[in-house]
Image: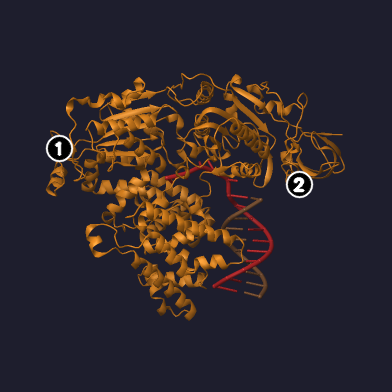
Chain colours: A orange, B red, C brown
Amino acid sequence: MTLILDPDDPAGWREAQPAASGGPSGSRLTDGLNPEQREAVEYRGQALLIVAGAGSGKTRVLTHRIASLIESREAWPSQILAITFTNKAAAEMRERVEALLGEGASGMWISTFHSACVRILRREAEALGLSSTFTIYDSADQRTILKRIIKALDADTMGFTPASAQAKISKLKNELADVESFARNANMNDPQEVMFLEIFRQYTRRLREASALDFDDLIAETVYLFRAFPKVAALYQRRFRHLLVDEYQDTNHAQYSLIRELTKPVTRDIVEDLDAHGILVQSMTDASGGIPGASLTVVGDSDQSIYAFRGADIRNIVEFERDFPGAKVVLLEQNYRSTQNILSAANAVIQNNFDRKEKKLWTADGDGDQIVGYTGYTAHDEAQFVADEIESLHRAGVAYRDIAVFYRTNAQTRALEEIFVRSALPYRVVGGTKFYERAEIKDAMAYLIAVANPLDELALRRVLNTPKRGIGPATETALASFAEQNGLSFRQAMRAADGLGLGSKVTAAITGLATLLDEAAAMLVPTPQAIAAGTNAGAAKVSDVLVFLLERSGLIDALRNSRDPQDETRAENVEELVGQTKDFDRENPDATLVDFLTQVSLVAAADELDDASGTVSLMTLHTAKGLEYHAVFLTGLEEGLLPHQMSASEPGGPAEERRLFYVGITRARKRLYLSLAMSRAQFGEVAVAMPSRYLQEIPEGLIDWRQSPGMATSRGGTRPRALNSRPGQGGAWGTRDRDLERFSVTRADKPKTEWANRVTGTVRDNGDLTLQAGDRIRHVDFGDGKVTQVTGEGTKRVAHVSFDTSGQKKLLIKIAPIEKL
DNA sequence: GAAGGCGCTTTTTTT
DNA sequence: AAGCGCCTTC
């Protein structure tokens, strides 16, 4: 028996695989794969690009590839670094690899870019002059800091907003630019640019002083680390022999650079240095005495690139072969997810993006059902259609969890939620306003952060007067300037507040808070033996520290005793947070507070998905990437929404929006529904909406329009049936006068497919029908009535009508199903 | 320093 | 429609 040693896990002795048992072509891991998939699993070389169309089984290929590397003893689990798009995908991939291997595969790094970088950065923080307990700032934190800087600099007078500065800084960091490099290239004659430089400089300094990194820093700082410290880089270059990157089309320049750094060979002199430090390098070196670069596998589909707005560079995948000469390319086109009708629609749409490599998805599984289309008069009508169809699917045996509703913007959930609640449909909004973004949760988290990272001024200032302690802005500023003048941290200034000459009550409040935080910090210190052994034994559990902080600070009592009725919910939320820390403690017995904070910072929207939930999932098209459902509803397919208004001005915007539509379509396995509304409320005002241009791109015969944009134009011919007069819905609609969206819905009893592509762009249009107070009108559903008032302008003119039998309504004149009498 | 009220901007997508 | 910031008043 031969034993071989896992170079990074002394406990990892195992029996070597007898060479005869098949090697990489061992059939178990390639059984049931098509030839291309098999090739992607078995290819061995420096660089492999797997162009994986939607639903082509790329996760299967990736997991089988990893399992095959490990099973054939070409790699130890610890030599694998796999990058996925979400933590959930990472956890799934790990499970599947372990299931394939029939054993645990600890030591594998399967995580997101951000998680992997945090892990590296905490380990190597010292080299960068960071605390290993550095805080991760989210967008809201960034914004708070930028708001303060902009205000202090009066930069808003030059047109700077926190959002604009944030976007610009993020963009720079994604390109690996820092303050110095920006300053070198800046046009110092442009006052705008000089001001931005100052904002950027102060922002960077504040984060640095707080020992904090923003999301973009996590990647960029890791690249800087590797570039500035080749020996540190070598540790990781030596360790990770196989890099696998999923969703490669959505990597940005910083992430690309990180991949490049990690796959660089280690030179001979550094290898010798590692060797001298007792790091195992034997049998890893090549003829030159160095360690060759790791092998790289990337998986992606340029048609699914939807993150240009955060710096994703489609060229990374398009130019992969040029970047990595000798790279092998495998194309996966056979789809195992969707029906041919769905794929044909997807192919037809994406074909309109020029400048792409031709790729056609196909399936051997047959056409399947027609795609269903529907045009509602309002967002509520559209939502009602979705709810009705979901119910009918459910009655036909489709589980709620196999159904998803997608939309372009988070704001669109409102109408859907209203109708779903009313219909008693179990649903869950994935992402959107996240639990951890609620103010009371951020408050509680700020206590924990302040304890974990005493340098974090942002967290300290957040808790300073939460709950109310009588410490106002004036005191806060006094503390801050005292700190600055004396070269102290904010926290030190708090401890020394006695010497500031503030009122005795305020002073006691400040020093009391400082003491509380110090006591909590003391709870977290492990035993000396544990510290020596590098474990966390003896440290208080996260949940205990949190409860201690909540009780002693008075935060929880303040919420419970408040007379604001909303504070009751807030108290419950905080209690739920306590529950979550308890779960965390249970699941991660040796984890630290910093581990908890890291995990919370890096949860992605899709991580919240609970497969066992038994609810319909609502999410944005972006969140939907990588997921699949039996039935998918794509809603709000209107100009201005998809493509979104804001994308029009961006280069490549409309093409990216089309890819977003493509991503949405290809999530569906069996049933696809496309819907839109003829009018939509925006900024509190109702506006006329036009069908999305992308709808035209789908061949006529593929869609069964239950109510088409074309039909909505022609008034005659179909028997109108008002949804809101349906039994069981009695009167719930239209009872509130302020409700502007009470247009009727007509719905053909029989499916009609008379809508042809050319009709797109037309909705019911009453032209320049002019109404004024006193006019009599007839409405398709509400009957006759008298106009009492006309408000608004242009296409947004609204008639206030008093109907003879249906009461008061407000109608959008341009599209309401009305005629003048 | 706290609380309440008014008026203004806001919505693209996310780790 | 709603949340935020600024203002006034207590």
A608 to the left or right of A132: right
Q: Which residue is mark 1?
A: A3
Q: Quadrant of residue A798?
A: top right
Whether residue A464 is visible, yes or no, is yes
Graded by Cα atoms within 10 Å as few (under 14), some (14 to 19) or many (20 or more), the crowding at tag 1 reads few
Residue B4, given in percent of the width and then of the height, sits at 66, 66
Give A792 or A337, whichever is nearer the viewer.
Answer: A337
SS at circle 1: strand
The residue under the point 75% across, 48% down is A736
Identify the mark at residue A92; answer none if there is no mark: none
Give A678 or B6, whichever is nearer the viewer.
Answer: A678
The residue under the point 49% across, 37% down is A624
A154 to the left or right of A41: right
Nearer the N terminus, badge 1 or badge 2? 1
Question: Disc 1, disc 2: CB below 8 Å?
Answer: no
Q: Which residue is mark 2?
A: A735
The residue under the point 42% across, 38% down is A312
| Chain of the residue that carries numbered disc 1 in the rendered image | A
Graded by Cα atoms within 10 Å as few (under 14), some (14 to 19) or many (20 or more), the crowding at tag 2 reads few
Q: CA distance from mark 1 to mark 2?
A: 78 Å
Eyeballing the image, is C10 above or below A52?
below
